[in-house]
Image (cartoon, coloured by chain):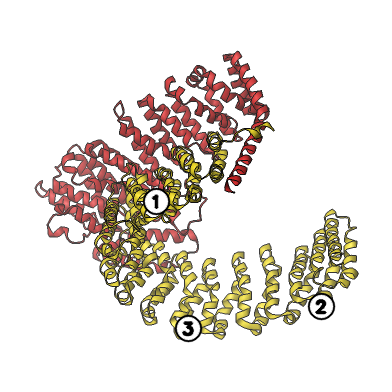
Amino acid sequence: MFNKIIKLGQKKFNKSDQHHQDNNNNNNNTSTNTVVRGSRTTTPAPSSVSNGESQTTAQSPSQTPNHPMFTTTPILEVLPLLKDVSSSDRPLLFMKKAHMCSCHCDFSDTLIMPREKEIKRQTLLELVDFLHSSSGKVNETMQSELIRMVSANIFRCLPPAYHENTGAPPEGNDPEEEEPYLEPWWPHLQLVYELLLRYVVSSEIEPKTAKKFINHTFVSRLLDLFDSEDPREREYLKTVLHRIYGKFIFHRPFIRCSIYNIFYKFLYETERCIGIGELLEILGSVINGFTVPMREEHRLYLVKAILPLHKSKGISIYHQQLAYCVTQFVEKDYKLADTVIRGLLKFWPLTNCQKEVLFLGELEEVLDATEPSEFQQCVVPLFTQIGKCLNSAHFQVAERALFLWNNEHIVGLIAQNKDVIFPIIFEALERNMKGHWNQAVHGLSENVRRMFLEMDTELFEECEKQYLENEAKACELLEQRELTWKRLEEAASLAAN
Amino acid sequence: MAMVDEPLYPIAVLIDELKNDDIQLRLNSIRRLSTIARALGEERTRKELIPFLSENSDDDDEVLLAMAEELGVFIPFVGGIEFAHVLLPPLESLCTVEETCVREKAVESLCKIGSQMKENDLVESFVPLVKRLAGGEWFAARVSACGIFHVAYQGCTDVLKTELRATYSQLCKDDMPMVRRAAASNLGKFATTVESTFLIAEIMTMFDDLTKDDQDSVRLLAVEGCAALGKLLEPQDCVARILPVIVNFSQDKSWRVRYMVANQLYELCEAVGPDCTRTDLVPAYVRLLRDNEAEVRIAAAGKVTKFCRLLNPELAIQHILPCVKELSSDSSQHVRSALASVIMGMAPILGKDSTIEHLLPIFLSLLKDEFPDVRLNIISKLDQVNQVIGIDLLSQSLLPAIVELAEDRHWRVRLAIIEYVPLLASQLGIGFFDDKLGALCMQWLQDKVYSIREAAANNLKRLAEEFGPEWAMQHLVPQVLDMVNNPHYLHRMMVLRAISLMAPVMGSEITCSKFLPVVVEASKDRVPNIKFNVAKLLQSLIPIVDQSVVDKTIRQCLVDLSEDPDVDVRYFANQALNSIDGSTAAQS
């Protein structure tokens, strides 16, 4: 009876493997897509001879057990439980089970091989328990087979992302609003990730031995997976990578470096990576662990890799994590405030108001941790920008900027530098009073103006005078500029003759 | 004014402007760099302006981008080619900027300048610059370096050439994947300048390394270079070195790599020659056509005609055609659409008999596809099939499908069909057109989508041009004029539109005898929109008809309209009257 089911299942599997011509009766776009995606993930068959496979074996030749059992393609079958066999038989059975789990099941249809799927699930669960209970030691060859199985399962070429899909409508859609693609075989994948996590955190596993398997190649392939659209997978990846970072101290520089490389690729080449937020989350806790005084290397990467992340137009997806990283830096080393603030100013959005509101929020967090000495260094460019925000035609931006004056620490900093700040801000406030369309902005501007007046009446009047003078001169300046260029033009044509 | 007498310091003006807070002003002043340079003269441009710019690379990316672009065409302002080297330092520092577009523009400008430089100057200043960038500490410099090797390599000494090749091979092994990607994507360009002896020995080694890279993204770019390299090599070397790689790549586990292969494969076939194409590349291509990933099949399907063009018809029929049949009922509409856009091109390759036997059924099934893009793609290339199988067969087998599509519920499909009607008409000839498509042409004039009605009116004009006024008099004009009593004012308006388009084609006589009475009648319509369109139409008829007709009929009609209660009607009537007066004034 069982054999019959297997045969039936395999028959079906092969059929869908061959191609999916028979799915022709799809009526709409979406259903076609899901079918194609489904069958893609389930059919790794034609590529088994390919590059990737040969790569993995090439990297770990010594780890291949020479037992004939491991050279054949695994078949999912019921094996005795690990706890039921003698401890001497356990390693071999463990490896057999691990090897068995390296084969894939077709999840495009629940009717295909339900029994095999269940066997794989049960086996994976048993392996998870085995690692967890540490009821038996996991020797080197067992680890090798285990990680090989994990690799065979999780390392795969991700399906076309939404933007790569020809069927997707062209640009202009918000990645946040798209339904994420969920891996159909998550029931298995999750257990494999769980197994990997157990392995990494297990106190039984020595980093010295494990680093043969959790090597640079393994880590960088793990990082590639952060592009997965499935949020559940990214969540696991985040935890696993974080634990690897914690346990394998010698991998730390490599992991940091690889993360920064992903950022560069995102920033300067593709502008796409779904997992930036998760990577920043890991980085946030990594930064938290930096020793003070901070090494020059870390400061460099702050400037070169982390601050530029403010540039992307898709920042809203990872802004929270980014802001956390950035404030971590300032809280660790207050001297970095100037660097961070200048970085924010460099990437300040010109037209994107939602982004501007995010920036102002982050700025407040950073300023909260800023000391007067650093504040002083960047006060002029900073308040020139804030002045522009105050005058923004988008009321949320103007409002958010005005809220900075609700923060006691910031008001304290402003008071100390009022001689510089008043003249810059005065014009912006004055302009808002004269003609901002939004009533709330009007009121808030008036409050800030009154605050200035109360702080230093004399300075306030001086600014007022200056403002009126500038106002009168503005036109003249414009004319003069045009005249200068005209004269240059003449001089140029004269020189040419 | 007193200011005019003040001395003028062009550099000071620029420095001043570049300090301004307003980025637009800074941008403007960079855009006028050439003015400043001309005012300064060549020598002071070299000695003052350029050094100033070299130091001023800390501005907003937008300003830097403008600077990188301006410097690319600055050779005349520094005193010609022999002084071109002074432009290198500012561009060198722009090459190290992180922002990709600034870097790329700087590289582009450097290539522009370098390719004009004399050999001596190249050795003295350009090659050292390449070496400095290639050894740069930050990845931006090294990425930029990859893009200018091909300029430096030409025309420098053998010793330097050896050194440059060694440096490039270092870049191919760089720690940063960004740099390796840049090296991979520029390898083909660099290889075109390298002597053939070193191609095999050195460039191919670099290529091999890149194709084995850990990172998918690097391998991907290496495939992209495959075809370019293949064309540089002797056929036998190409077979030995590139072919195995590409066959291997066509089975890569990453669909992105396979996708790239699908896009490049036919070019590679040209490089390896027919024999290897038959034995190695046809199987690879067939695999790609049957790939599991729809994106790969889309890419492969889109190249099917180009690929078949390289094969002889028997091979195409034997190997490719079965796949094409499968693809025509692929589960992904985009695969079918890609196939539909090229498949008509296979007709001339296969010849008449095979087309009828094998392709026609596929055409027909694609024409009935549920997805409008697929149907459209087929229709747009009908003329190619016509040339092969002849009009009779085409009209028998394909026309019913086309007529069906003329009433498609997607207006874009209808629009496309209308746009092909004149072409069809010219292919099918008068005889066939009369009974089938004529009625449709009139029906479109009353479509509920404006674009269709507009296209329909245009179509009538083109038909009149194609078949001549006499035919149009019989088959188009009466039907159009019938519509003037349509209760819907938008449809009445379409009559006016059709008249305005057809009148120039039909000529003065028909316009006066047939169109004008209808138009005059329409001027008494109750809808103002009709009336002012009459005014506009009459204005456009003035140059077509005789002066006497203008004076007798048109003027009177317009005068009546100019007293209409509606302000718009009066406005357009007066406009038309003015233009009558204008034209008579010009004649006298």
Q: Earlier in the sequence, mark 2 or mark 3?
A: 3
- Which secondary structure, mark 1? loop
Task: Work out whether residue B446 or residue A396 is closer to the camera in this orientation and state it.
Answer: A396
Residue B472: image quadrant is bottom right
Residue assigned mark 1:
A182
Task: Work out whether residue A260 or residue B80 is closer to the camera in this orientation and state it.
Answer: B80
Observer-side mark, 1 or 2, equals 2
Q: Is residue B147 above or below residue B372?
A: above
- Residue sticking out furthest to the front: A497
Q: The numbered mark 2 sits on a residue in which chain?
A: B
Q: The numbered mark 1 sits on a residue in which chain?
A: A
Gap between marks 3 and 1, in whole Å?
Answer: 45 Å
The answer to whether residue A328 is seen in the rendering is: yes
Badge 2: few (under 14), some or many (20 or more) residues near its Cα, within 10 Å? Answer: few
Could you say which chain is coloured red in the image? A
Image spot of residue A410 (x, y percent): 49, 21
User: Is A1 displayed left or right of A466 in the figure?
Assistant: left
Observer-side mark, 3 or 1, equals 3
Q: Is residue B247 above or below residue B477?
A: above
Residue B152: image quadrant is bottom left
Residue assigned mark 3:
B356
Image marks 1 and 2: residues in contact by CB distance under 8 Å:
no
Identity, as a three-letter code, of the amino acid under mark 2: Glu
Image spot of residue B506 (x, y percent): 76, 76
Image marks 2 and 3: residues in contact by CB distance under 8 Å:
no
**Residue at position x 67%, y 30% in the image:** A435
- Which part of the image, by quadrant, shows the N terminus of chain A? bottom left
Gap between marks 1 and 2, in whole Å?
Answer: 71 Å
